[in-house]
Amino acid sequence: MNVLEAADIEALTDHDTYALVPRTQGDTAFGRTFTDTVFSMHWSPGRKWHDAQLSRLGPRPMHPGTVALHYGQVVFEGLKAYRLADGRVGVFRVDAHAQRFCRSAERIGMPPVPTELFCAAVRRLVRADERRVPDDERLSLYLRPLLFARDESLALRPADEYEFLVMAFVTEDFFGTVRRAVTVWIDEQYSRAAPRGTGAVKYAGNYAAAYQADRAAAENGCDQVVWLDAVERRWVEELGAMNIFFVRGTGSRARIVTPPLTGTILPGITRDCVLTLGTRLGYVVEEAPVSVEEWTSCCRSGEITETFATGTAAGVCPVGEIRSSRGAVTVGDGQGGPVAAALAEQLRRYQRGLADDLPWVSVVPRSLGGRAA
Ligand SMILES: Cc1ncc(COP(=O)(O)O)c(C=O)c1O
């Protein structure tokens, strides 16, 4: 049996899309308009990973009895490729995303995609889409790897057949191109993740199960939900699609605190970057639980000077106001503070290749024939 290797993926030929006008032009809202290429490969018990290809992205036939539709055996990732300052294109922290994808697949009983195949697939798609990666600093190419169960059977057991896809779209930051402080809603009704559940992996079901809380947040004029722990309903865990940080004090005495990874929080790759960059900027950085009472009372007293959220989609994003059924609290002056701004700027420098002393960017070779008009 031929074992699929990263080199086979790197050597895949493009389907000819270069003549097309980028469909992404003009519509950069999150996840609405995909590029026209998709990477795919299949897994079966006998052949393992096989049939890697690039093809045109579009509707595909799916049997109504497909396992993924019924029992939710689906995991995904979200990462970005950026136009670097020197004109090349780089994928940000692809290895870390590959490792998290393996952990997600294993937790949901699926065959993990070997990290070298994951990285090769992402890099190959980015090479096919290289001309679509915008020069505009506010935009980037978002990549969505997806693994789902393909069996056409309603037997209640892990499937035998799987498909792995990588698709892409050009996007602005999650909250739009203008950086602003977001308002968050403390959810008191639902739980996102229970101990020993699926909260620490990017399992599709985690997101659908959050929709009712998301709706409540939107109805209360908020951008994101704040999740509390499921047991004591007291400890701040994370936001709907971002990790959370608190800043105590100001200036050189500022301390950055984020909740520890206890198994119910998604270990964000941006969170990991911020822990590293915060230390490098000279702040004391700490992983420690923060209760909702402490958070809100310390914002009122001024002891907590900033709160910010981190994620691939939105980068480092200040939180300006906290709302709940008990009222509203403004964080600092409500506009975001200097610590979040400094971290956002540092992160941007690494994403754009302006700083390269950490191995975070994987440069993708330029496709033939120059950039699209
Ligand atoms: C629930 C949740 N928390 C945190 C994050 C931030 O993770 P990352 O920084 O890897 O994008 C995400 C986004 O993937 C998420 O969905």
Image (cartoon, rainbow, N blue to C red):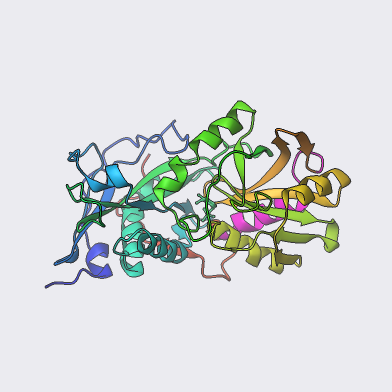
Left or right of 113? Residue 142 is right
Return the x and y of residue 153 as percentages of the image width and height: 17, 48
Q: Is residue 354 visible?
A: no
Q: Residue furthest front?
A: 231
Residue sitting at x 72%, y 60%? 257
Left or right of 32? Residue 343 is right
- How many labels were placed on the picture? 0
Q: Main secondary structure of the magenta part?
A: helix
Residue sitting at x 36%, y 68%? 115
Which quadrant, please, contains the C terminus? top left
Work out whether 212 lies above or below 307: above
Q: Is residue 148 one of those drawn in magenta? A: no
Return the x and y of residue 3 as percentages of the image width and height: 18, 72
Return the x and y of residue 30 as percentages of the image width and height: 47, 38
Between 122 and 183, the residue placed more toward the observer is 183
Left or right of 92? Residue 169 is left
Residue sitting at x 49%, y 61%? 196
- Residue 187 appears in which quarter of the rendering? top right
Residue sitting at x 59%, y 63%? 261
Q: Is residue 131 visible?
A: yes
- Residue 162 appears in which quarter of the rendering? bottom left
Between 279 and 172, the residue placed more toward the observer is 279
Between 303 and 212, the residue placed more toward the observer is 212
Q: Which residues are magenta?
A: 332-350
Q: Is residue 345 one of those drawn in magenta? A: yes
